[in-house]
Amino acid sequence: MRLKPKSSLQVGRFLLLLLGFLVVCLHSGVASAVAEAKVQAILVWGTDETNPTKKSLKQLDSRLHEKLAKVFKWQHYFEVNRQSSGLLAGKSQGLKLSEECSVEIKMLPDNVAEVKLIGKGKTLVTRRHSLAKTEALVLAGDDRNNNAWFVVLNFN
């Protein structure tokens, strides 16, 4: 018994279909394994005091200072701490910014980060932030003596 060879058109269609299937499989595999996004978290203290008593504070860079000053009322902004980390899809990453303040970040599907702001061991706020946005995520709260604190998160 002899098999009849398929036409070159049928073989071409089969190969094209197979190639399309492989591209879809590889793309979905890569998308689910997209490993890295990076986050930088900055703990900032806003105040009208010109000389803070804490020696570990340093002036906030002018670009970020200008952005915060456009929205908030304080004259001076000081960097308390800065932490950076890589993020893996589906995994939570914690960043401790001070004894009382930390953030927990989890990469969700569709290029979204879920951020939990934790103060004194309690979750204060949970926000979702699309990584397609180029602007920073800013979380803020009041402090004593008419001061404020901010956590500025930059993703890339």
Image: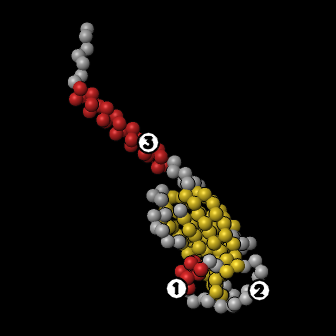
Label 2: how many residues lie within 10 Å, few (<14), some (14-19) or many (20+)?
Answer: few
Q: Distance between the residues labelled 3 and 2?
A: 56 Å
- Residue at image position (51%, 48%) is 33
Q: What element carries label 1?
A: helix
Q: How far apart are marks 3 and 1 (CA)?
A: 45 Å
Q: Distance between the residues labelled 2 and 1?
A: 25 Å
The tag on residue 70 is: 1
Residue type indicated by callout 2: Thr
- Residue at image position (52%, 85%) is 70
Label 3: how many residues lie within 10 Å, few (<14), some (14-19) or many (20+)?
Answer: few
Considering every residue shown, the one lying at the far front of the view is 62
Position of 154 compared to 119: left or right? left
Q: What element carries label 3?
A: helix
Q: Horizontal and vertical percent for residue 156?
A: 53, 62
Placement of 11 over or under 5, stated as above or below:
below
Q: Horizontal and vertical percent for residue 41?
A: 62, 69
Q: Horizontal and vertical percent for residue 85?
A: 63, 60
